[in-house]
Image (cartoon, rainbow, N blue to C red):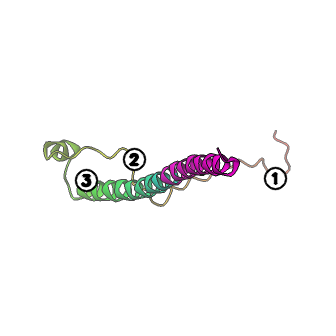
Amino acid sequence: MDINDIAAKAAAKIDAARDAKVNAVKAAAASGVELQEAAQLLAAAEQKYAKDYQNALRSDWTESDLRGFGLDAPAKKAGGRPRGRKPVRETTPSAGGVQE
């Protein structure tokens, strides 16, 4: 047995194991990127569906009508401009601050 052959075989085995580990991480990372992209596409599709569903309701269709067509109410509401809060009126005491 040659020590250099044994060392070369050991190094080749270690390199192969390292390459397998690196390839496993690369595959997981690629799947993670695909998952994030799919989540973004899903969020955009849900937002569009919510807006289109609201437009159907504004066009005088009822939720019952839409369910009859096989359309479920969206899980999330359509985004839009937030409703403003009504200003709170403060009561002011009389001019002198003293009431009789």
Q: Please report the bounds of the magenta region as a residue range.
A: 1-28
The residue located at (64%, 46%) in the rendering is 6
Q: Position of residue 2 (x, y in %)?
A: 66, 48
Q: Neighbour class for label 3 at 10 Å: few (<14), some, many (≥20)?
A: some
Looking at the image, which is closer to me, 77 or 58?
77
Looking at the image, which is closer to me, 5 or 15?
5
Give the mark nearest the N terminus, 1 or 3: 3
Give the mark nearest the N terminus, 2 or 3: 3
Looking at the image, which is closer to me, 98 or 31?
31
Q: Position of residue 38 (x, y in %)?
A: 40, 55
Residue carrying label 1:
95
Nearer to us: label 1 or label 3: 3
**Element on which disc 3 rests:** helix
The circle on residue 57 is: 3
Nearer to us: label 1 or label 2: 2
Give the mark nearest the N terminus, 1 or 2: 2
Residue 59 position by quadrant: bottom left
The residue located at (18%, 47%) in the rendering is 66
**Element on which disc 1 rests:** loop
Q: CA distance from mark 1 to mark 3?
A: 52 Å
Residue carrying label 2:
76
Q: Amino acid at mark 1?
A: Ala
Q: Is residue 100 left or right of residue 64?
A: right
